[in-house]
Image (cartoon, rainbow, N blue to C red):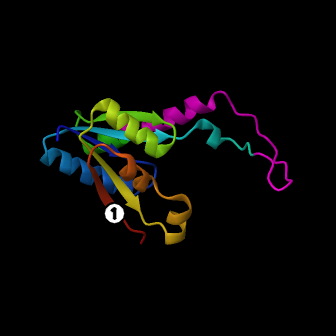
Amino acid sequence: MKKVLIAIDYNPTSEQVALQGYELSKTLDAQICLVHVVADVRYYGMQYPTFMGFDSYEVPLDPNLHGEITKVADSFLETAAQHLNDPSVKTHIAEGETADAILDYAEEWGASLIVMGTHSHGTLEKFLVGTVASRVLEHTKVPVYMIPIKRD
């Protein structure tokens, strides 16, 4: 294991994922990269198609929104990396659908292991929408280390 990619999001449980992933990486004497995925910026706007005859109002998408979202993500990753107190930790902002973006960057960076948390979702939610973790597991080419995160 030479490169460990640790996927984190804004959920406070990501601290546990980052810390455990970091400890595992150090045990393996591997390079570390924290990755955060910014979803398609269109999801941050309020533009919805007509649904059951209801025409939602459209809020114009601010052209600066993408830059602002990226700045926040960059600040988040830099703060997380500083929290680990290791200047060798790399960071990367990926964009797109979360599972695909994680897998794409893992391949691009040459990750030999992906570390991510699994949030405690209900059975119905898993059935209807699945989870990022399950989609990563289904399509990965490298091992995945899952850190179970339970709701209190």
Q: Is mark 1 on a helix, strand or loop?
A: strand
Q: How crowded is mark 1: few (under 14 residues within 10 Å), some or many (20 or more)?
A: some
Q: Where is residue 12 in the image (x, y as percent from the top left)?
A: 42, 56
Of residues 113 and 19, which is closer to you in this image? 113
Question: For this view, does 37 lie left or right of residue 23?
Answer: right
Please determine whether, in this image, residue 54 is positioned above or below residue 59.
below
Which quarter of the image is occupied by the C terminus? bottom left
Identify whether 98 is placed above or below 65.
below
Q: Would you say residue 69 sits in the magenta stretch?
A: yes
Membership of 67 in magenta stretch: yes
* Three-letter code for the amino acid on which mark 1 is drawn: Pro
Q: Residue at x 50, y 64 (%)?
A: 126
Q: In which quarter of the image is residue 57?
A: top right
- The magenta stretch spans which residues? 49-78
Residue at the image position 26 percent from the left and 36 percent from the top:
89
Which of 35 and 99 lies nearest the eye of the viewer?
A: 99
Residue lying at 85% horizontally and 48% vertically, measured from the top left: 55
Relative vertical location of residue 118 with respect to residue 23 in this rendering, above or below: below
| Residue on which disc 1 sits | 148
| Quadrant holding the N terminus | top left
Decide if residue 128 is in sight here: yes
